[in-house]
Image: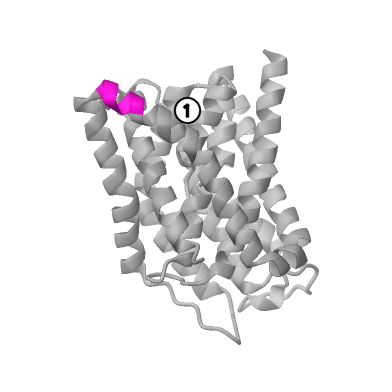
Amino acid sequence: MNAIFIVLPILTLLMFDLGLTLKPQDFKLIAQRPKPVIVGLIGQIILLPLIAWLIIRVLSPFHTFRSCPWAENFHLSPLFIIGIMLVACSPGGSSSNVFSMLAKGDVALSVTLTACSSIITLFTLPLIMAWVTASVRMSDISIQLPIGNLLMQNIVLMVVPISIGFVVNIFREQTAAKIHNVLKRIAMPALVLLVTVFFFQHKQTIVEEFTSLGLTMTLLILATTGCGALLSWLLHLTTKERRTLVIEIGMQNAAQAITIACSPLIFNNEIIAIPAIIYALMMNLILLAYVGITKIKA
């Protein structure tokens, strides 16, 4: 089974579901409370890819880069490096809104950040990934990033379903709420199905690389959630805002990363999607633990 036929409808439904939760007043939050919004976007758009790149540089075999004087001390293949950076450049989807609600965070802030980052990364993701693919040296395989195809695919799979959901919520708010209640229940089982299909298709590779990729992804999640907590503390944000920023900065859209990796119009390489699969597993474990801690504190 080709995973692209599973991940495409999942991503489309997730983005449509995000649109169903959006309201015009959500965007007014940028003017009403600019500090947490700006901090969240800086964390998602700038700090997250930067942290991922630093972790890769510390853990990866440096001979995979064009100019690295240091010796090899950990194994990450060039395809995995591209996959890790792809995850870091994909903003949190509608699942982050659910986690914010479970953690008793600021759901309105979560929705605003998710919507804004989804729009901004339409442009930042192609730029960062073009630089990444140009920076990684691969002797046995050629990886090209068709930026035009990436931009068009993101518009079709993200902007269009988000916009449709947004319009439905404006003109048919009760209908939007009913559809959202259905979609939020099937999102997690759909992602579990996707992870299961990927695991059986690439079982040997995942098992062999789980130590290095599991460590890398765990470090990425812990570093970014910690960064969200630190920024919130330094800027004296409220408890609800802090909890939301921890989740929004630490939680990425694995479905989008998998779609880009597997798409025949872009990378067309399922190996690049493996970091996103492992990230989805570690992300849910760590953030569920965080939600549990917030409930204890409450």
At 71% from the left and 48% from the top, the residue drawn is 218
Q: Is residue 135 left or right of residue 19?
A: right
At 71% from the left and 49% from the top, the residue drawn is 219
* Camera sees residue 39: no
Q: Is residue 54 left or right of residue 179?
A: right
Up the image or down, 143 lies above or below 58; here it is: below
Residue 210 in the image: x percent, y percent?
74, 60
Up the image or down, 235 lies above or below 113; here it is: above
User: Quick one: which residue is furthest to the bottom in this view?
Assistant: 140
* Pointer 1 local density, CA inside 10 Å: few below 14, some 14–19, many at least 20: many
- Range drawn in magenta: 173-178
Residue 267 in the image: x percent, y percent?
46, 71
* Camera sees residue 96: yes
Q: Is residue 177 magenta?
A: yes
The quadrant the C terminus occupies is: top right
Instruction: Examine the image and state in which quarter residue 205 appears.
Output: bottom right
Residue 247 in the image: x percent, y percent?
57, 34
Residue 30 in the image: x percent, y percent?
35, 28
What's the residue type where badge 1 is placed? Pro
Q: Nearer the viewer, residue 135 or 68?
A: 135
Determine the main secondary structure of the stretch shown in magenta.
Answer: helix
Up the image or down, 168 lies above or below 16; here it is: above
> Label 1, on which residue?
36
Instruction: Examine the image and state in which quarter residue 99 appears.
Output: top right
At 45% from the left and 62% from the top, the residue drawn is 4
Instruction: Examine the image and state in which quarter residue 197 appears.
Output: bottom right
Up the image or down, 275 lies above or below 66; here it is: above
Q: Nearer the viewer, residue 32 or 162?
A: 162
User: Quick one: which residue is furthest to the front in this view?
Assistant: 1
Q: Is residue 52 magenta?
A: no
Q: Is residue 125 left or right of residue 175?
A: right
